[in-house]
Image: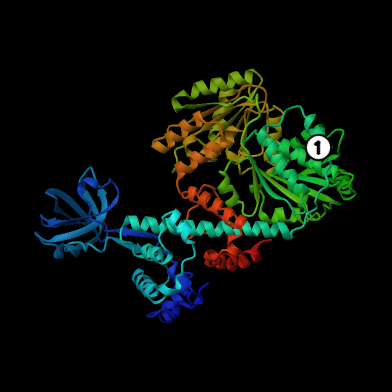
Amino acid sequence: MNTLLNDPVINVKGIGEKLEQGLNSLGIHTVEDLLFYFPARYDVYEIKPLSELLHNDKVTIEGEVISEPSLAFYGKKKSRLSFNLQVEYVTVKAVMFNRSFAKKQLQIGDIVTVTGKWDQHRLQITVSNYKKGRAKSDAKIQPVYALKSDVTNLQIKKAVSTALSQFQDSLQEILPQEYLSAYKLPGRLEAAKQMHFPDNHQMLKHARRRFTYEEFLLFQLKMQLLRKRKRESTHGNSLEYEKQAVDEFVEKLPFRLTAAQLRSLKEILTDLHSPYRMNRLLQGDVGSGKTAVAAIALYAAITARKQGALMVPTEILAEQHFQSLTELFADHATVVLLTGSVKGKRRKQILQEIAEKEADIIIGTHALIQDEVLFQDLGLVIVDEQHRFGVEQRRVLRDKGLHPDVLFMTATPIPRTLAITAFGDMDVSVIDEMPSGRKQVETYWVKENMLDRVLQFIQKEVDNGHQAYVICPLIEESDKLDIQNAVELYEQLKEFYAPKTSVGLMHGRLSSDEKEEVMRDFAANDIQVLVSTTVVEVGVNVPNASVMVIYDAERFGLSQLHQLRGRVGRGEAQSYCILVADPKGEVGKERMKIMTETANGFELSEEDLKLRGPGDFFGKKQSGMPEFRVADMVHDYRALETARMDAQHILEAGSLDKDPQFKQLAMHVYHDNIVMGETLD
């Protein structure tokens, strides 16, 4: 790596101590930091014909003032200045707010260039910038940087411009020529210049493409190297499980495993047998059979005479797993349940069984990671709905055993490459097919005027012995959002279904104990209709529930709607999901349409990506997610996949260490990996 780029930023000509302090506050400490402090956005002063302007876009037009500017005052010191411009033989109205001084500057006959928001319908521009005279043809796209302290946009532009010419020999190419040619990418120096001072939209687009690919390739190389290094340095248990016993166990299951389940199981068993610690994510759609695969993995650990632990987010789910696994392992293993509700003598007894290895499989909530829980020989840890647990909680559980293998499970479908990136240094297994014979949940989209029919349909299902969820986006009324809320809806439905049908209420503001109580009543069919916010999205399994009604469904993303839909269709009966929505925009309508046509969670997550664009696909910011200067994991998803495959190929071929044209790339990867390796637990 070039040492000159590591020089302090004050070494750039024209930067003094005061500006250096301001730049430091922006995170710019070295010359390299400055060169890669790319603009947050660009102001475009490109004169386009009126016919090409889009309604509500920020545009620049040039014209002749053909009316005396008219000034009106309103409110306290607020003003509105308006005048007419002749643009291409068309009269355009220009409006400026709080620029009363401009009245004296603008005369009939003046040529002016104005930039602002374009109203196609009124042929009107709301001006944010103006200058007399014609626009300079070379000042079309202007960089706008993210600023704070006293640093101005002009100061950064000047500093970057100087640094680019002063240090251009140091900004060496790091991508091998074959990749630049294959993807038609500009060189590093040229791309950096275009990012700061683009000649035109096309050049900017290519510069962005180049740095997007560079960032992703570096990231993928680092991640894959770290995963390899971490796997090789964390010696696990190399579980000597009894293959024949496991095969017989699988044969005796009351169902046949799908090809996807078998593939994932093979990957997990290979990890268990290897001398390295397993760190794998198993993702599969709701109902795809992740739990069956997890159960077989637990059985394999038992045949290797190890203990297994299954940690889940809620007590209800822990109890459900306990019941099903106790049944499944009746002749093979001792299964115990440890949650916050297990107290007194029973708790002491279970803790003793765990410590003395009388308990083979331990199922529980985060109670499993408390200090008092001592495993004698923990070989495998499975964490269900792993995003519900913090990194620290997972680490504590992992460290309770002698390097146990760890399997994380999630039912949130994420395209594979994003999953690999989002979950860092894990290997990823995907169950992407459903067991045969499973009935698909029928999904319907209805408008609010059909509510009565929906409520009567629920009653019909309840009369047939089934149950229903009714989901609301909010808990209490909001002035800003005209939507049904859970509390109000609960009162309405209680009245509607009285006296023969019991209605319950569940939301995030209830205490954990209150939530558990409501869910127990629902699971026991003491409540037939459960009004709830999205807290039921994950970790609730009531096979008797056959109807999911989602109010204001347009307010949810596709993945969330799919998770909610997955709460029904878990029993023998045909199940239904009814989306009550009246979306105004095209995206909302498209979302409803996709939901009624698509049952596959992975296909839905791909569609969600397309609809959301560069929005935050993961909801809350993922712990440990990389920060990219240019790239966006969602928007540039295809480039991420390309970079992942290229990184894999480079490492498998050993090019980083052997091939001279990879020297610069290798220096960046290995230098950064020293730092990254130190930050990993």
Along the line of sight, which residue is nearer the eye, 528 or 93?
A: 93
Residue 127 sits above or below residue 472 on the image? below
Left/right placement of residue 626 relative to residue 209 reads right
The image quadrant of residue 260 is top right
Numbered disc 1: secondary structure:
helix
Left/right placement of residue 658 relative to residue 203 reads right
Specify the amino acid type for callout 1. Val
The quadrant the C terminus occupies is bottom right
**Residue 342 in view (yes/no):** no
> How was this image coloured?
rainbow
Q: Position of residue 280 (x, y in %)?
A: 68, 48
Residue position for label 1: 246
Q: Residue furthest front?
A: 659
Along the line of sight, which residue is nearer the eye, 164 or 616?
A: 164
Q: Position of residue 509 (x, y in %)?
A: 61, 44
Residue shown at the point (77%, 38%) measured from the top left:
296
Residue shown at the point (74%, 58%) measured from the top left:
234
- The number of numbered discs placed on residues in the rendered structure image is 1
Residue 257 sits above or below residue 158 on the image? above
Q: Position of residue 571 (x, y in %)?
A: 67, 26
Residue 426 sits above or below residue 246 on the image? below
Q: Position of residue 609 (x, y in %)?
A: 49, 43
Residue shown at the point (47%, 70%) measured from the top left:
33
**Residue 607 in view (yes/no):** yes
Residue 680 sits above or below residue 547 on the image? below
Neighbour tally class for label 1: few under 14, some 14-19, many 20 plus, Cα within 10 Å = some
Left/right placement of residue 118 relative to residue 676 reads left
